[in-house]
Amino acid sequence: MLRKLALVANLDAARFTTAYKAFCFGRIVWLQADLKAEPQKREDRRIDLQIIRAFEAVSVPDPAATRLHGDVPARKLVADGVLTLKQPELERLQKYMNRGPCDTGHLALLEETLDWLDSADKEHE
């Protein structure tokens, strides 16, 4: 099953950025803490890569923003579009978002973003 979120650039920019950052940081926490130095399975890496590609398909690197970590640039939504994920990819994104750190000032936006992801339209592949 595919999950599709229609993105309106001027309305969804903050939620998009929150989802992308929370994915990146939550993935690091999951890899370091939850796997406890076990290697990530190849299938899991492929799911993560598909999530990254979905974000990249509707955004561009933001050179004005601080890099998230290492060589991972911040990204910004630049136009209306559709974020398309398979159901397992959406579940992984939400898992990482729930696992990563969130400062108190961003709790409301994180929860709003998770609700927004839950609202993604369902479509059969």
Image (cartoon, rainbow, N blue to C red):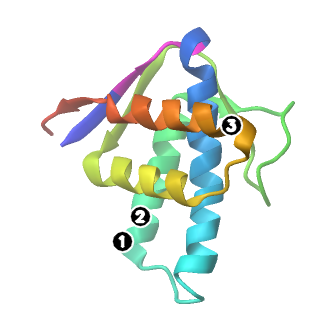
The residue beneath circle 3 is: 106
Q: Is 55 colored magenta in this rendering?
A: no
SS for tag 2? helix
Residue 93 at x, y percent in the picture:
45, 51
Q: Residue at 29% of width from left, 46% of height from top?
A: 86
Relative to residue 55, is residue 10 drawn left or right? right
Mark number displayed over residue 46: 2
The amino acid sitting under disc 1 is Glu
The residue range painted magenta reads: 5-9
Q: Residue at 60% of width from left, 89% of height from top?
A: 37
Between 27 and 84, the residue placed more toward the observer is 27
Q: Nearer the viewer, mark 2 or mark 3?
A: 3
SS for tag 1? helix
Residue 17 position by quadrant:
top right
Give the main secondary structure, helix, strand or loop, of the magenta stretch: strand
Instruction: State yes or no: discs 1 and 2 in contact (Cβ < 8 Å).
Output: yes
| Image position of 105 with respect to 49: above or below | above
Residue 61 position by quadrant:
top right
Q: Residues within 10 Å of mark 3 (few under 14, many from 20)?
A: few
Between 44 and 61, the residue placed more toward the observer is 44
| Image position of 69 with respect to 114: above or below | below
